[in-house]
Every structure is written in structure tokens, then in C-alpha cells.
Image (spheres, rainbow, N blue to C red):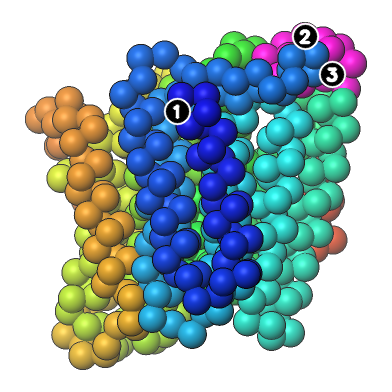
Amino acid sequence: MNTITITWIAIPFFLGFTIFLIPAVARYFALLGTIISAGYALQLFQESAPLTLNLLDNFGVTLVVDELSGYFILTNAIVTTAVIFYCWRSDKSAFFFAQALIVHGSLNAAFASADFISLYVALEVSGIAAFLLISYPRTDRVIWVALRYLFTSNTAMLFYLVGAILAYQTNHTFAFAGLKGAPPEAVALIFLGLLVKGGVFVSGLWLPLTHSESETPVSALLSGIVVKAGVYPLVRCALILPDIEPIVRIFGVGTALLGVSYAIFEKDTKRMLAFSTVSQLGFILAAPEVGGFYALTHGLVKSSLFIIAGSLPSRNFKEIQSQKIDTTIWIALVIASLSISGFPLLAGFGAKVLTLKKLLPWQGILMNIAAVGTAISFAKFIFLPPGGKEKAKPGFWMAVTLLIGGLIAANGIYLEAYTIDNILKAIATIGIGWLGYLLIVKKLVIYLPRVLEELEHLFGMMSLMLILIFWMALA
């Protein structure tokens, strides 16, 4: 299994670079790489114990793959496959498919990392490849957005690297477990880097502009899986270090409430989905024990929602509320919106029930409020009028069918959620959200300020977050 794991990590990079030599096979090689990852992820769920590979024992450079890794790797495989399907009949060049595959491979490496150095390398590679995907259209607007993303990401990773070195000086290991007993400044620097990279809380306010201005398949890739590379190590650290877990849970609740507060009042479809991503990352962090399952369901649903949003006649909610949407596209939109809202018969229901079940008492009320806010946000999609006749883009139905089919299949992971109490609570939560939307939110015209999303303020927020995390680690 060790040899298989090393080969699995190397294959996407090998295929990605081969695409540059043989552009004609770009689509097929990209698809082959994701299928291999899906097979490897499914194999992990059959393993009875975690697989550990010590690459550099003296420095604690280690790979660990287990069920938690399996959820993230499977999400990566399905989301990237859907993006490839969506672009299959487009005019995307071999360069695009190669970069998508390199992002895929570097994320796989991040989800197998159990030390700060191999994670750093994986995050940096994924960041550069994601930058190239964001800037792919080569317009002035997207190039600025891509450079903004790269600059913010690299600055955050510099903080992270300094923190990793400080942690190594304390325990002489780069392993995640070496964070125990590390000075609070090391914890603060590492966490700041990961929070920014993952788009969590105010550190993640770079995310809405980046995800909303990118092309549809790139937005699906970013929100569906790329940001989870920063969230995964936070979940892993929370599971192995009891002193770290409270900090992760606090940020989970904070980002869930912050993101949903913006999403409720957002008038742009893609920005609403981006703010929802900020919020949904909070659900992953709020209950680390089941974060992998929630990451899977969110990755599938958010990728499908971005792809569907790309086929709507407008990004402005006010405009599309007065237009009819193609009925089949509307049905797909409603199914995805119901899943993320936690409706039974879809994977989002089981994920939400399991997450809320694993919360600490102080988290319960706040996360239930966030769940109602999610229902309000996606009521804006559900109550759009069907009946239009616009055609979906080539590759649309292949991608959406895969993602929604995944949501239906993943519903079987936690069938214990189907009790009368859980079903009634889910329906009540969604019902309250819909009433809140129809009676209050739909009639409001509130424009939230975007000042905190400006580049200079993003770095100001990093400084404040560094102080906050340092204080939390010290306490």
C-alpha cells in the first residue's frame, strides 16, 4: 500500500506534465488522473487502520492517509471530474486541463500530509496552479483578481512558514503533533496562514471576489475543493491535539455566522455562493470529528451550484426573479439548494444532522441560527420562477448529473439520521428560513459594505487575526 500511495501522489503530476508534451490527450489524461484518485479514496474506506509513511524521520516529514483523508480525496476526485466534464466540449486548451490536474494532485498531497513542511509545499503548488486557472481568460479584471489571490495567499504562507520553524525549534519535528507545547506565537502564525488559505472568518474575505469573478468551472473548483486544503490541517490538528480543538471550534462558529450574514443580503448569485462557502467551512470546523463527511457533501453541492449559476440568464437576483428559468435547470438548482439547506433524502441532511449532533452545548444555538440563515440564503434560488427555455452549455448535464448523483448516493453514509425528530427539525429549520425570506428578507434592500474586501484591509485583518489567535493560544 505504501508504493501505491506514493504512485497515486505522483500520477497527477506525471500526467499533467505529459499533457504539455502531447496536448491531444489533455482531456483523457485529466480524466484518468481523477478516476485513479477516486479509486484510491474508496480503497481508504476499506482500510482498518491509518496508513503512515515516514519520509524524513529526523524532521518529522510524514504522510498519513485514513478515513478523514478519504473524504477529502474523494471530494477532490469527484469535483475535478465534474469540472473536466463541464469543459470537455469547450474551447479550453491543454494548458487549462494540465493546470486543473496539477491542482488536483497538489490537493491530494495536502490531504495526505501530516507535517507542516510537506503541507507547505502542497499548498504553494496548489496556489500557483489555482492562480493560473483564475487568470486563464487573460482579461485585465481576472488578472488583477488572480494576482490579488496569489499575493494574499503567499503572504499568509510566509506567516505559516515562520510559525512552522518556531514549532520545530520547540519540539524538533515538523509533524502536526509537534504543535503541542509550541509557543503561542507559533500556533498563531500557523493558524493565520491556514485560516487565510482556507477562506475562514474575516481572514477569508478575499474569497468572495476571487470566486465570483473567476470562470464558472474555476469557481466550482475553488469553492468545491481548493479552499478545503486550508481547512483539512485545522481539522486534523483539532483531532490529535485537545488544546487546539477549542480554537478550531470557535473559528468554525464565527465563520459560519459571518458568511451566512453576508449571504442572506447578497444580491449577486455568485457572490452569495461564495459567502455561503465561507459559512459552510464553519460547519466543517465546528465539529472536527465529522468534518470529512461535511466536506464531501459541501464540495459536491457547492460545485454543482456554481455550475448551475453559470447557466442562469443573469447574476443579479432582482433580474432573474422577473425571468423564467429553464425547468430542468431549475429542478437541478432546487435539488442542490435543498441539499445544502439540509433537506431529507439528500446528503446535506445527514451531514447537518451529524454535525449538529457533535457540537458542544455552547455551539448549538449559534450553529442552528447559521442553519436557518443557510435556508434563507438558498430560498432565493428555490423561489425563482421556472418555465424558461434557455439551453444549458455543453458539458453542463454531465457535470451536474455526476455531482447531484453523488449527493443522492452519499445520503446512504449516515442513514441513522432518519429519525422522526431529525426529519421534523430539518423541515422546521427550512420552513422558518423560507418564511423569513418571503416575509422579511425578500422585501429588504440592504447593501453590505465591501470595504473589508479591499486588498489593504485584507492585510489589516491578518494583523488583527494574528493578535486574536495569539491571545487564544496563550489563554
Residue 333 as seen in the image, left or right of residue 344? right
Query: What amino acid is found at the position of numbered circle 2 in the picture?
Result: Gly
What residue do we see at 35% from left, 41% from top? 39
What residue do we see at 23% from left, 73% from top? 330
- Tell which of 372 and 222 is nearer to you: 222
Query: What amino acid is found at the position of numbered circle 1 in the picture?
Result: Leu
Report which residue position mark 1 lands on.
68
Q: Which residue lies furthest to the front in this view?
A: 22
Answer whether residue 172 is magenta in the image. yes
**What SS does tag 3 mark?**
helix
- Tell which of 73 and 224 is nearer to you: 73
Residue 261 as seen in the image, left or right of residue 304? right
Report which residue position mark 3 lands on.
168
Report which residue position mark 2 lands on.
181
* Front tag of 2 and 1: 1
Query: How many marks on residues?
Result: 3
Name the spot of residue 443 as percent of width and height, x first: 37, 72
Answer whether residue 342 is magenta in the image. no
Name the spot of residue 329 as percent of width and height, x first: 24, 75
Name the spot of residue 287 as percent of width and height, x first: 45, 27
Crowd class of label 3 (few under 14; some 14 to 19; many from 20; radius 10 Å): many
Query: What amino acid is found at the position of numbered circle 3 in the picture?
Result: Tyr
User: N-terminal of the two: label 3 or label 1?
Assistant: 1
User: N-terminal of the two: label 2 or label 3?
Assistant: 3
**Is residue 287 visible in the rendered structure shown here?**
no
Give the spatial CA distance, label 3 vs label 1.
25 Å
| Residue 103 drawn above or below residue 237 | below
User: N-terminal of the two: label 2 or label 1?
Assistant: 1
